[in-house]
Image: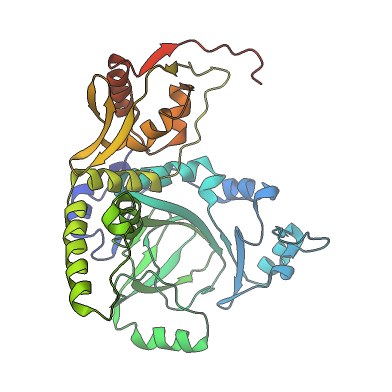
Amino acid sequence: MTDFAAFIAPFDADTFRAQYFGKRPLHIRRAAAGPAVLNWQRFNEVLALAPYWNEDTLKVYFKNRAAPRENYCDTTDLRPGAKALADPAKLQALLGLGASLIANHIHRVCPEVATVAHVLEREFAARVAANVYCSFKGVQAFQTHFDLHDVFALQVEGEKTWRIYESRADAPVVPLPPGDEIEKWLTASRGKLLFEAEMKPGDILYLPRGQYHDALTGAQASLHVSFGVTPATGLALFELLESALTQESAFRQYLPDARNQVQLRERLAALAERIKAVLTSPAFAADVLNHQRGLAAPTAEYELPAQPPATWYSLARRAQVVRRDSGHVAITEQGEVPLGATSPTVEWILKQRFFSLGDALARNVSVDPTELRGVLAKLAAAGVIVETEMRSEGLA
């Protein structure tokens, strides 16, 4: 699977983006099981990776309540601050009683699931986490609830009935506290049943953030992968603004005493105008682009025993990265070099005596390799960096 269109087929990807993403739920039925992402055998193999599964990555629920870690983890001789590893014997005993199992962040240890997660990251410029839900006949692990992210639920084994309700929370970002009162409130506020989705292997259920829902396992054990998709929200702008505006003297100055309302209003109005200018500038657009790119986890792809070629550079002349509203530039003796979204990487480069292209790319995984190579060529033409050779003796 290489793109979103293949993941969501036979539903049309363009129609989904225009009419459903962030707007309304959708059940995609498939005549066939679709791309092989996970099955019982593969799930058992991944669960056998014992060092990864602990009290955080593995959760057990019974009748909507989380099992205490001592009920399914090995807590003997546990060092302070250490995570208790899952105990397979305890875990299987609970599953035999009908408990449900949630394997969190399985994309970190299962390449097949990671492939889908990376497709969704690229498609929606989002952070994506994949959790697996394993439940048994007639089990409802969770009462009615909503999630803080968009969900693509992919049914891979067995069947499950999802009930989707008409209510939808308004762009939630803070989880609700657990407890009976909250559960009663959710049930009372969920609204009428919008539709039921009888999920069969290969089916996909899309739920926008905040959509009320619950689910019930059918006559056989069920296994589904839930891909949580979390794009950046407007709240991310505050941290980006703080980083950008810290460089400006006007924002580092003390504010007027608030008891002098005239002076305070004048200062706040002036700062607000500057904030608007920064927010709408090309330089800030590059900041947002880097932030969104940074949400995606780096792919773990190796081609050993092939050894990646290393291109080395040395710093020959000084240069300085300057932020302007029109964009970041490197000031060199030969003039200015526009940096676009590569500015954080170039700032790191200019502090090194020697660096490799691979190391520069690794320092900032959000940078576009083609864009960075173009900027490096311009810096080389300006005499700032020089391609060189680095001896590898002593490197291990």
Image quadrant holding the C terminus, namely top right
Give the camera-side residue of 47 and 41: 47
- Quadrant (top left, top right, bottom left, bottom right) of the N terminus: top left
Name the residue at the right extreme. Answer: 77
168 lies above or below 271 = below
Residue 9 visible: no
Residue 60: name its quadrant. bottom right
Residue 220 screen position, x and y as percent: 54, 64
Number of numbered discs overlaid on the protein picture = 0
Decide if residue 161 is on the left or right side of residue 62. Answer: left
Q: Residue at the location (29% across, 83% down)?
A: 192
Residue appearing at x 36%, y 46% in the figure: 121
From the viewer's side, name the closer residue of 257 and 67.
257
Q: How is the model colour-coded?
A: rainbow
Instruction: Where is residue 383? Give x, y as percent.
Output: 32, 15
Residue 184 lies, with reference to residue 221, above or below; the image says: below
Q: Position of residue 219 (x, y in %)?
A: 52, 68
* Residue 186 makes an appearance in the image: yes
The image shows residue 294 at horizontal and vertical percentages of 39, 45
Quarter holding residue 78:
bottom right
Q: Is residue 247 above or below residue 319?
A: below
Q: Nearer the viewer, residue 297 or 342?
A: 342
Examine the rendered structure and indicate whether residue 320 appears above or below residue 334. below
Q: Is residue 197 left or right of residue 262?
A: right
